[in-house]
Image: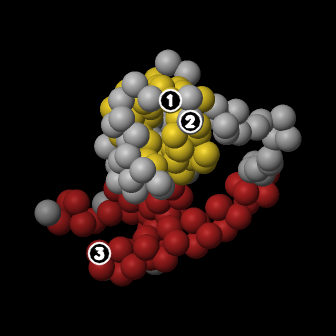
Amino acid sequence: MDLILANTPYLWILVGIILLFSEFLLPGTFVMFLGVGAIFTGIVSRLVPMDFYSEIIVWVVSSFVSILLGGSLIKKFFKSESSVDPFVTDDFLNQIVPVEIDVLVGRHGGKIKFQGTLWDAISKESKIPKGEYVRILSRENLTFTVEKVDS
């Protein structure tokens, strides 16, 4: 046990390197910052003798600082882009589609067939039986709101 505690700076550096390389296997950049904190802790604990609990505190603080500084640096170099494509339209609006499973009023369970796929559907006015046709009014996530089409 004394051998392990005497070599904790090297263990911190080894753990940091392992965390840095594990970043290739895990999505995101979070683990990389923990690895940077571990390497920093190993260097500090090699220069300044400290007990294991102090090393843990140094690791937590240095990882937190690494996340804050590194995260802002990554955002600076790798800017995210969000835009609205003016050519994408709500192609489902006002489409006439068949009911596959009775559509209920304000409750899930009904199904319509749109573009070859079954979708959840609800009605705001009346129950619509299977075999009828409906007009799509809106969509919320994966559920369409529909109304019966008078034939």
The answer for how far apart the CA atoms under marks 1 and 2 are is 6 Å
Please tell me which residue is depicted at 58% across the width and 39% down the height of the picture: 136
Residue marked by disc 1: 133
Q: Residues within 10 Å of mark 1 (few under 14, many from 20)?
A: many
Q: Does residue 134 lie above or below 40 as drawn? A: above
Residue marked by disc 3: 52
Residue marked by disc 2: 149
Mark whose residue sits in front, 3 or 2: 2
Q: Mark 3 belongs to which amino acid?
A: Phe
| Residue placed most toward the observer, 118 or 63 | 118
Please tell me which residue is depicted at 67% across the width and 39% down the height of the picture: 93
Q: Is residue 127 left or right of residue 72?
A: left
Q: Is residue 61 left or right of residue 79?
A: left
Question: Residues at badges 1 and 2 in contact (C-beta under 8 Å)?
Answer: yes
Q: How many marks?
A: 3
Please tell me which residue is depicted at 36% across the width and 35% down the height of the picture: 129
| Residue placed most toward the observer, 27 or 31 | 27
Q: Mark 1 belongs to which amino acid?
A: Tyr
The answer for how far apart the CA atoms under marks 1 and 3 are is 70 Å
